[in-house]
Amino acid sequence: MEKIALITGATDGMGLACAKLFGKNGYTVIINGIVDEQAVAVQKDLNDLGIKNEYYHFDVTKEKEIKAAFVKIKAKYDHLDVLINNAGGLGGRKKFEEMDMEFFRFVMALNFDSAVFITKECIPLLKKGTNASIINYASNAAWNGGGPGAGIYGASKAAVVTATRAMAKELAPFNIRVNAVSPGTIDTHFHDNIKKTNPQVFESWKKNILLGRFGRPEEVASVIKFLCSEDASFITGEIVQINGGQDFL
């Protein structure tokens, strides 16, 4: 049976690294994004690598767009083996004292709501998959509360941690495993603003990483690939740190 992986936010960074790795390992990859021009370039790259792929435009923070996209996805695909809830982001920085409801809801929707509602749509397809797995994304911020102005980001990721364990309990009877990865500082466009405005500060973060360097998207993708493989068939409800020892310092 054809192996199928759906990856949100897969037109860049860790999501794209996952699309390439799973595709090279025989999966058809369904990728999601909101920048269509970027998706065109990504699909060309995947096609050049011989990876069967399809792109769906929908905003993961909007339930109506998610539902509309899945009407099309479910009409074409009868099962799903892997769901990677990669889409997410900092969403900006605001102190609690300065925060408004619009900002709060956007950050929560981007990181937490998206994982919940996309998983909801995928469960019927995953029930028909083989060794089906869901991967969510936590963050160091879920444990340390985040950096300045990133408290709600940390809270949204802490919610993902709890939801991952709840999903693992609920879906175990259907042989669907649910785990999360918790990347440390991975060198992606996520950090572009600080790299441009204060590169010295960005480089100084290496001092807090035992291995003395930033992670690469491919290193996150390889852990996700393991978690979705038969080699990890007895692992569920776990949060795997991928941070080069960043939590130890």
Image (spheres, rainbow, N blue to C red):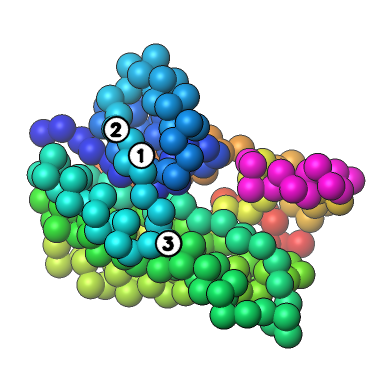
Q: What residue appears at the point 63 percent right and 41 percent down from the top-left corner? A: 188
At mark 3, the secondary structure is loop
Q: What residue appears at the point 79 percent right and 55 percent down from the top-left corner? A: 208
Residue range in magenta is 188-200
Q: Main secondary structure of the magenta part?
A: helix
Residue underneath mark 1: 31
Q: Is residue 10 above or below residue 150?
A: above
Q: Is residue 104 above or below residue 194?
A: below
Classed neighbour count for the residue bearing mark 1: other residues with Cα under 10 Å, few (<14), some (14–19), many (≥20): many
Residue underneath mark 3: 61
Classed neighbour count for the residue bearing mark 3: other residues with Cα under 10 Å, few (<14), some (14–19), many (≥20): many
- Please identify the residue farthest to the bottom as the structure is shown: 97
Q: Are marks 2 and 1 in contact (CB under 8 Å)?
A: yes
Question: Tag 2: residue type?
Answer: Glu
Numbered badge on residue 54: 2
Q: Which quadrant would residue 167 be assigned to in this image?
A: bottom left
At mark 1, the secondary structure is strand
Q: CA distance from mark 2 to mark 1?
A: 6 Å
Q: Does the rendering let one see residue 161?
A: no
- Please identify the residue farthest to the right as the structure is shown: 200
At mark 2, the secondary structure is strand
Q: Is residue 168 above or below residue 49?
A: below
In this picture, residue 62 sits left or right of residue 217: left
Residue 76 in magenta stretch: no
Question: Tag 3: residue type?
Answer: Thr
Q: Does the rendering let one see residue 217?
A: yes
